[in-house]
Amino acid sequence: MKEEKKLLETYQKVMVPNYLPADFIPKTAKGSRVWDFNDKEYIDLGGGIAVNSLGHANDELIEVLSAQSKKLWHLSNFVASEEAIKLGEKLTDNTFADKVFFCNSGSEANEAAIKIVRKFHSSINQDKTEIISFNNSFHGRSILNITLGGSDDSGKEFSPLIEGIKHAIFNDINSVKNLISERTAAIIIEPIQGETGIVEANKEFLKEIKSLCDSNSISLIFDEVQSGVGRTGHLYAYMKYEIEPDILTSAKGLGGGFPIGATLVSDNLAQTLQPGTHGSTFGGNHLACAVANKVLDIVNCPDFLNEVKIKENIIKTRLEEISSKYSLFSEIRSSGLWFGCDLVKEKSSFEFLDIAYGEGLILVPAGSDKIRLAPALNIENEDILEGLEKIEKVASKF
Ligand SMILES: Cc1ncc(COP(=O)(O)O)c(C=O)c1O
């Protein structure tokens, strides 16, 4: 108790106050269970915000990470990496993409996507620099990405933001048509919005966007940083829609907890990033790529992805029961092991989370009025059931 309390006091002293952490500190974790400094056990249904795709301390990931840690950590991108090459091959063999750029996060993957598109048009002397994004979307926290996100509260204080970015309304094709001009270079969209609480684009809407892109020489960028790598029960969510982008950004679950980002791109656009035009010190590093190779090997199997959908049904059915018993949620949306639940009461999701911590349950919010579940894709059924029991207890106290 003392050690944890002291650490939390030090946190207040030394950390920039941009986060509001829980009042416990995890010490160890395995699978979908976490233990704090007082040996209190938690079921983890937050999955590190859709990052820990294979749970905590996964034996197979530990094995590849420790093997790689004894061989080679870092040289630089002036020298190729075996693990990065293998991962690039896997990602291109299994998706629409011909080429990959590796970086360390979702924000950086989006940065590369926008740079590719703008440079592509400038290299063929086209005055196409404008990007269409969507209101209430989320693309990260860099100045570019908050500009893409288009939410008033995260942008104004950091102005001036990036020029040439306009915002349409999600699932409203006329709002997109109204913004398209000869200067439009790209449309960037999350096929399923995560931070907004698992809000899916309609298939028809995405199809129309794709055809607008095709007929106006506009590149289509799918931000699959949160929806990718099995989260929806498909390797990438675009596969469920059967609509291919020109560029796709991936991160979070790709490294199963080890930081990595990737920008997947079609060949004609990729050629624009010639030597010296873009780069990343740590991007494609040996450790991250070794882990991501293993994550993909495990996740990209029909049986594994099918299990994700089976577990989705178990969780959704039980969440609906709990919700109707306690009038908890006005809507529950899900896609694979990814749930957005709108709270009925005008109480904040952070209050819900605090009660959950007390009950030994880790969840994540989606804004201040929604609860999000994004558990490990391989979560055991026993952990699911215990986690849902805890949600019921939290509901009774909320
Ligand atoms: C859809 C989406 N894009 C981009 C990002 C930013 O990723 P990162 O925090 O790794 O920069 C996130 C993070 O939540 C996200 O959900």
Image: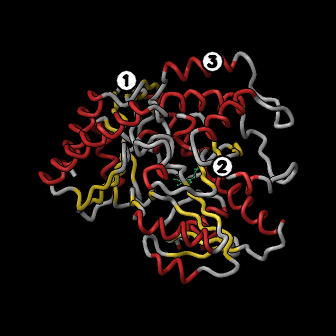
- Residue 312 in which image quadrant: top left
Residue under numbered circle 2: 263
Q: Amino acid at mark 3?
A: Ser
Q: Is mark 1 within 8 Å of ligand 1?
A: no
Residue sitting farthest toward the left? 325
Q: How many marks?
A: 3
Residue 34, image x, y percentages: 40, 29
Cβ atoms under marks 2 and 1 closer than 8 Å? no
Secondary structure, mark 2, is strand
Residue at (54%, 32%) from the top-left corner? 296
Residue under numbered circle 1: 39
> Mark 2: few, some, or many residues within 10 Å (few <14, many ≥20)?
many
Compared with residue 221, is residue 391 higher up or lower down, i.e. above or below?
above
Question: How does the figure colour the protein chain or chains?
Answer: secondary structure
Residue 88, image x, y percentages: 67, 37
Of the two numbered discs 2 and 1 in the rendering, the one whose residue sits closer to the viewer: 2
Residue 32, image x, y percentages: 38, 30
Q: Amino acid at mark 1?
A: Asp
